[in-house]
Amino acid sequence: MMRFWAKTLDKILVIKLAALGDFIQAIGPFTAIRKHHSDSQITLLTTKPFVELAYASRLFDQIWVDKKPRALAIGNWCALRGQLLSGEFKRVYDLQTSDRSSFYRRLFWPRQNPEWSGIARGCSHPHNNIKRDFMHTVERQAEQLRMAGIENVNVLGSLGSLAAPVDQFALSGDIALLVPGGAKHRPEKRWPVERFSELARQLLADGLSPVLVGGSSEAKILEKISADCPESHNLCGQTSLLQIAALARHARVSVGNDTGPMHLVAAMGCQTVVLYGHSSDPALCGQRGPNVTYIRKPLLKDITVKEVKEVSIT
């Protein structure tokens, strides 16, 4: 969504840098900000992995990529400051609310002092709930925006445009989307691969075609499942985020670990089952959507295939 603007119109900056799950759960706030500032030019400051999603949302007039300068990269900091000042923003919505994004407020000083919604010290519209860190991301951001004068933040926001062609995968019939990966440094958040293999075989017996998605770092996991269930479709490294969204729209069910893509799948309305262990709490970071079920046990390996099937096949 690119438009031409008169210089007298308000200019708004939204900051959301990472991660995938947090970005998806910011679509609702993005949409509310767009509606509230319908006659303003809105710029998003984000990181490279989320540019495609941001453009597809059609909620922003400009999208800037933050290279997240390191502490001593003075030249990069100066470039970022120059870019921020060039925006001549009237208001900033910091939805990242990290130490880094809060520090960005200082980059405007002393030449500019835009209104600021976030947790930066001295900002004009602080989210000053001392229990904010104990709130789910969705409710926390909605409350932050209410304190800045924006009401009625829809949880899912504008997701209708998030899609891309998937014809090249030649999928047919009812599919079951399996997301067996997760952060490499968080193995405790991964359901055993053998359970995913067993689940794939049982879903196949029930007439569903298992479709495996994940990144290149998860190749061995997907290869194992594919070897155990040769009829499954291994799309490792072949899908963009928008294509995952499209697959989720077509899937009868999706099962996965607490990982970023599952936030996208859940938000698309797919019947979604997310598996949790002790290391993360769905009350604080759980996937949101119209048809989401969490299964949580202290040890992920204690979740059985039977338990997953009981809630995933309806």
Image (cartoon, grey):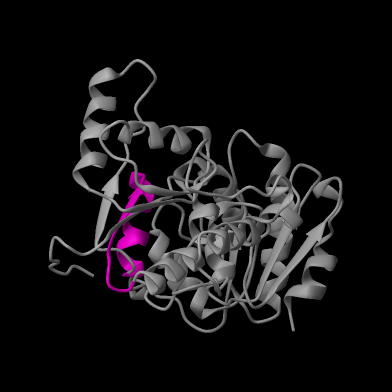
Query: Percent x, y for residue 100?
Result: 46, 33
Query: Percent x, y for residue 149?
Result: 51, 65
Which quadrant, please, contains the C terminus? bottom right
Position above or below: 139 against 209? above
Query: Percent x, y for residue 293?
Result: 74, 69
Position above or below: 17 against 91? above
Q: Going 63% across and 67% down the picture, which residue do you hit?
A: 288
Which quadrant, please, contains the N terminus? bottom left
Question: What stretch of residues is rendered in magenta?
Answer: 38-58
Q: In this orientation, does residue 212 appear? A: no
- The residue lying toward the viewer, choosing from 59 and 198, is 59
Q: Going 55% across and 54% down the picture, which residue do you hit?
A: 21
Query: Percent x, y for residue 152?
Result: 56, 75
- The residue lying toward the viewer, choosing from 179 and 129, is 129
Left or right? Give the position of 2 relative to 159: left
Residue 160 sits in which quadrant? bottom left
Q: Going 68% across and 58% down the picture, which residue do you hit?
A: 286
Q: In this orientation, does residue 72 appear? A: yes
Query: How many marks on residues?
Result: 0
Q: Going 76% across and 57% down the picture, which residue do you hit?
A: 283
